[in-house]
Amino acid sequence: MDIYETGGGDGIIKMNNLKKNIKTTFYIFCLLFLSLMSYLTYFQLYERQKLIESSYNRRLWEQETKIKRGTIYDRNGVTLAETIDLGTEKKRIYISGEAFGPLLGYSSMKIGRSGLESALNGELLGIAQKEPLSLLRQKIYGLSQGNDVYLTVDAELQKKAYSLLEGKRGAVVALEPETGAVLIMVSSPGFDSNKVEEQWEKLKGDRGLPLLNRALTGLYPPGSAFKVVTLSGVLENFTGIEKEKFETKGYIKVGGRVIKDDNSIKPGEYSLKEAFAVSSNAIFAGLGLRLGRDKLLKIAGDFGFNSKIPFEMYVKKSQFPGHSLMDSDVQLAEDSIGQGKVLTTPLLMASIAQIIANHGVYHSPYIIDKVKTPLGQVKVNNLRTVRKTVISPQTADIVRDYMVEVVEKGTGKAARMKDIKVAGKTGTAENPHGEPHSWFIGFAPAQDPAIAIAVIVENGGSGGKVAAPIAREIIEYYFKIRNRK
């Protein structure tokens, strides 16, 4: 009897354990099933289109033999890239030359895609997400053609800017202040997209990095051009500071580090406007210390540092250092004048000029004006609506006046024009790889801006002597062709 009861108890225990194991296994399978369904749902909603349009999707290349890739136009309807049918094959032709190489990129079955050809691949092949009705119409009419894309870029301006860089390594970005539309996006040296296959090995090994789009992915110390941000932060945080006087000995000592002014700056007393015009490192390093890390970090973030810029193509994130174990007054002083660990793209520097020109309001830059389907339907770029207030209109207007002073009486005289008032800021950015980078950011006309611009020449030296004259010639040419039209 005892033996029977013991055996029955063991059987019950074993049965209970079996039930628990079955339940555990069931729950695990349910969890795995839910995880799989969640992943597939996420994939369908968020990743599907990216993979469909990816350059690594070999089915796209098969599809491209059947579909005529869409044409890319500039803002005036000038053809930049088109596909011609040669009977047995389709060939992509680029009419725009080296000035557009890094921007347009290339579309090649041998080496893949880059630039706008990659970013807009789905639109150009007509496989971007569509309404069911649009798909049905294309099926009915038997259309085998991608969408045409119209850029905001002006081909004449683009080529002029590229020619002014004269093959030097650098970049030019110009924006419409009131909209953020890109007028120019040049990276130098460039390349001819028609010859990229035959010159591939040479282009890859070129020390000038012609395949790199410096306007979007080049990170540079901004030097004194960053003082626009520091000045904005000072004006936003210290009421009446524009009435104060500041003294420089020609240098400032911070924690054993000596930060010097340019030799052209005489020791003495300066107003804030004068200090900005002559670009005193000593005074602005002191202002940065007065502002403090938190406030300087905030104003830099408001202008776009440490944030992803919404754009149709990949843009590297500009960097302004926050708090760290290595943080010090020396680091803060250097950051205040655009040195230290501050790094930026030419696109962001053009946006900084755009913000001041537009009374403190930021408009997200965009380069796609519209997309036109073979059926004549037009899709407008959603980035047009992205905007935010960065600084007050009062602060922006003061900074604008100070930037005019830079061009009229300060370091930016080489950007001065006879009939149009230009507002600007120069930068001569020290770097560990040779001569300083040459910067100029600005806009014109100062009181009613139509163009905001950023110019960088790598290892070019003085911003006032190298980048500023280039900016002036581009601005002059902009108004010349605008008046002609």
Image (tube, rainbow, N blue to C red):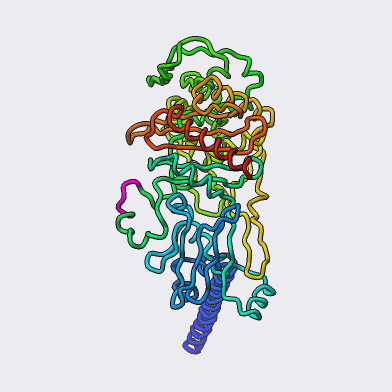
The correct choice, above or below, for 381 with respect to 228 in the image is: below
The correct choice, above or below, for 118 with respect to 277 in the image is: below
For image coordinates 46% across by 11% down, the residue present is: 267
Give the residue at the far front of this rendering. Answer: 484
Examine the image and state in which quarter residue 31 appears: bottom right
The x, y position of residue 14, in whole percent, is 49, 82
The correct choice, above or below, for 78 with respect to 41 in the image is: above
Examine the image and state in which quarter residue 300 appears: top right
Q: In the image, 371: left or right of 465?
A: right
Q: How many marks?
A: 0
Q: In the image, 430: left or right of 287?
A: left
For image coordinates 62% across by 42% down, the residue present is: 484
Which quadrant is the C terminus positioned in?
top right
For image coordinates 56% across by 51% down, the residue present is: 311
For image coordinates 63% across by 52% down, the residue present is: 383
Examine the image and state in which quarter residue 272 appears: top right
The x, y position of residue 296, in whole percent, is 55, 31
Q: Is residue 330 visible?
A: yes
Decide which of 263, 412 is in the foreground and name it: 412
Q: Is residue 47 visible?
A: no
The x, y position of residue 227, in whole percent, is 52, 28
Mainly helix, strand or loop, the magenta region?
loop
Decide which of 358, 93 is in the foreground and name it: 93
Q: In the image, 210: left or right of 359?
A: left
Give the residue at the far top of this rendering. Answer: 268
* Residue range highlighted in magenta: 204-208
The x, y position of residue 441, in whole percent, is 52, 34
The correct choice, above or below, for 190 with respect to 129 in the image is: above
Query: Is residue 475 one of those drawn in magenta?
Result: no
